[in-house]
Amino acid sequence: MNISPVNSRNSNISFLPPSFYGAAEDFGHKAKEIFTKVKVDKNDEAVLTDMFEKAYCEIMSPERYLGSGFFGNVYAIDENFAVKMSRYLNKFSNIKSSIAGGFKICKRVFRDLKTYYGEPLCSMGRIEILKNVGKHVPAGVPTSFKRQLDSSKEYEKYYQQKYLPLFAKVPQESYDALISDISKLNKMKYNDENYYEFDSKNPGNILLSGNKLLLTDQIEITNNANYNSVGKLLETMLYKMVFFHAVKSYGDNLNDAREILRKIIIASEKVDLPYDTRSADENIWNMVLLNCHIDMDADEFIQNLEYVRGTNPKISDRVPKIEKFLDNVYKN
């Protein structure tokens, strides 16, 4: 899901969530209480379903709107929870038919991924309750800007002057946390023949909330092991502006792009994330290196990184050498 910010024209981006009080918060408090239980009984399910019906119109108010994806709109319930529902539902929809089947706790496959906010906590018919990411900015150019910007040049201007500086300032620790979770996906199996991968086709699946990078949308299934790579991260953060538009230049913000690349590589070294596992990765690497004004092709660049990784098993030894390598290629 690409959750787009509400005040997308406001350059002074605020991450502070609004404060609400009312039926929606009552539902949120009850949901938090019930989610901590080892076993949820039928009475709990009925109580939550009834409370959601009473809070529905309040939740659908414009000030609670967090954003939209391809198939659904997202609204804040409280600081902990949000609701995702079909974009075709509105405040006057028949909520009883929309939540037919009542409240169901969802199986939490990705509970250990601390930066992943795309997994539903529970569902009620066509409605899902998620963890609330709060106010946020997606990587790349928000999808909602398609309706506001007049040309690809304006996309490019936002990407270069707003997105790159903002994400370049994100602490290394936030990159470490995100990429640690992505590495964990490579160690998880859906079944004996299939594995998990995050969706890298849409840059907006990575969000910045406060100073933390978060992963959203559904985790997909693949029959390829270790499919989550640095190349997939570059696709979301340095290769695409929006879903269908690749980056042509970092403009005057070249150093910001290089800083993002540095932080991705350093975080990837700390968890031994593979550099390229897909056929598409080589082209992505080549374009990112070209746009970063690095005079190496993907094969040579990755071979240098892999040599340092292979000859320095201790992270404390490896990271300074990776940084020295990057300093040298950035000078040229």
Image (spheres, helix red, strand yellow):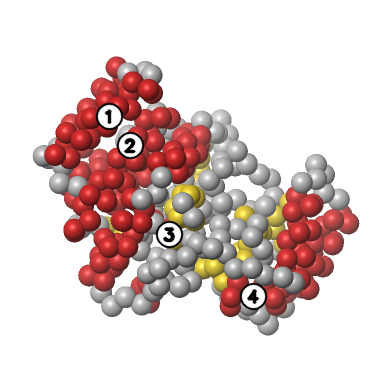
Q: Nearer the viewer, residue 171 or 190?
A: 171
Give the mark, 2 or 3, whose residue is nearer the N terminus.
3
**Circle 2 SS class:** helix
Q: Nearer the viewer, residue 15 or 270?
A: 15
Image height of 313 relative to 227, above or below? above
Asked if the residue under mark 3 is in contact with the one under mark 2, i.e. CB atoms within 8 Å, the reply is no
Residue under the point 65% across and 57% down: 80
Q: Residues within 10 Å of mark 4 (few under 14, many from 20)?
A: many
Quadrant location, the C terminus: top left
Q: Tag on residue 322?
A: 1
Separation (CA) of disc 1 from disc 2: 8 Å
Mark 3 or mark 1: which is in front?
1
Image height of 208 relative to 148, above or below? above
Separation (CA) of disc 4 from disc 1: 49 Å
Q: Is residue 126 left or right of residue 288?
A: right
Could you tell me the amino acid type at mark 1?
Answer: Ile
Q: Which residue is mark 3?
A: 138
Residue under the point 67% across and 52% down: 121
Give the mark, 1 or 2, whose residue is nearer the N terminus.
2
Q: Which residue is mark 2?
A: 265
Asked if the residue under mark 2 is in contact with the one under mark 1, i.e. CB atoms within 8 Å, the reply is yes
Separation (CA) of disc 4 from disc 3: 22 Å
Q: Is residue 165 left or right of residue 226?
A: left
Could you tell me the amino acid type at mark 4?
Answer: Met
Q: Residues within 10 Å of mark 2 (few under 14, many from 20)?
A: many
Separation (CA) of disc 3 from disc 1: 28 Å
Residue under the point 19% across and 50% down: 291
Could you tell me the amino acid type at mark 3?
Answer: Pro
Q: Which residue is mark 4?
A: 60
Asked if the residue under mark 1 is in contact with the one under mark 3, i.e. CB atoms within 8 Å, the reply is no
